[in-house]
Image (cartoon, rainbow, N blue to C red):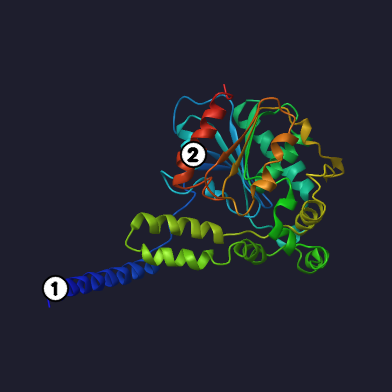
Amino acid sequence: MSDAPDLLEQSRVEFERAMLRNIKGLEYFASSAPVLGASAKETLIARGPLRFYHYKPLVDDVYRVPVMLVMATTNRGYIFDMVPGQSFVEFLLKQGFDVFMVDWEAPRPDEKHLGMEDYVGDFLPQCVAKVAEVTGEPDLSVVGYCFGGVLSILWASLYAGDNLKNLVTFTTPVNFEGMPLFQAWSDKRFFDVDRLVDTLGNCPAEMLYTSFDMLRPGQRVAGNIRLWDNLWNDEFVKSYRMFDRWSADMLPLAGEYFRQTTKQLMWDNALMNRTMTVGGRDVDLSRITVPFLHVTAEHDHIVPAAASEPLIDMVGSTDKQAVVLKGGHVSLVAGGNAIKRLWPQIDRWLGERST
């Protein structure tokens, strides 16, 4: 009988907890999604799938060398600009950098012809020219994330000229044999990329989303369970909604661009084998000689270390540094882990080279 009060109290606590969870669950579904990418900015270029932004400064004393962020073509760039206090863009602005960003929209059906040469040899050079026009500075630091890093190193090798001052890449693949699951799904024996592109035009976003989701098939279920267990934790729910929205907000890829990346990178591993061409021009990463910082994530399930680590030796710079930080493909660049690790690293490295 002495245990009865304890059992009653335990039952009361569990009942209240279940009620709180249900109330919070209703609030979750009824409330609007967080507003992301809200840092004040001006759209400098809106052409085809390209969106090029210039962010409003937050301090009076600004570094001489502007920074251009280059987003991957599969996702929206607001991963760089989540909410105040968790925005990489806001952080860079407060540290005194003049920030621009290359972002992407879904290509239209009539833009299925866009290829790698359009992204590397047209879109990026136009953005670089616009930075020089707006700032009056010939020098530029480029920071590329994931496949945005691939576009950045291709541009740096072929088209940068004297404009590039510093180059930073993180979670950027060059050895596509180091991405075994993507290799299996795009195996030329089973995957007819020509038929897909010739039939559909652009590569559907749903196909890309499923490919990324299958890298960790149980992650979405596990994430929902963690959300259920933490519904009364407002900060957890806020963070979950931000990242869940971004990860699901994938973009289709222009048909020719997808065909070229599949054949040259996934099938031929052309960057690693040094046989990559863009617009008929040979890519040679040893031509990149500017200061170079390359960051890989210790627990990256999308671009594992085997896929990204070789890049540091392929670049011809003498001032170059490879850094491995704790985190995954997304947590490296956004969230609490990024705030503590990646962001200060980039601030220090660029700050020393941006005067």
- Residue 276: which quarter of the image? top right
- In the depicted structure, whether residue 244 falls above or below residue 64: below
Give the SS element for disc 2: loop
Q: Which residue is drawn at 50% across and 68% down?
A: 221
Q: Which of marks 1 and 2 is in front?
A: 1
Which residue is identified by label 1? 5
From mark 1 to mark 2, how far is it between C-alphas? 49 Å
Q: How crowded is mark 2: few (under 14 residues within 10 Å), some or many (20 or more)?
A: some
Q: Residue at x 70, y 25 (%)?
A: 318
Residue 40 visible at all: no
Q: Residue 275 location in percent, x, y?
A: 85, 44
Residue 197 visible in image: yes
Task: Count residues near mark 1 (Cα–Cα under 10 Å), then give few for <14, some for 14-19, many for 20+.
Answer: few
Q: Which amino acid, by three-letter code, is at mark 2? A: Arg
* Residue positioned 81% across, 36% down in the render: 284
In the image, residue 173 sits, relative to residue 228, either above or below, namely above
Mark 1 falls on what kind of element?
helix
Looking at the rendering, in which quadrant would you find the C terminus? top right
In the displayed structure, does residue 85 sit left or right of residue 152?
left
Of labels 1 and 2, earlier in sequence is 1
Q: Nearer the viewer, residue 259 or 4?
A: 4
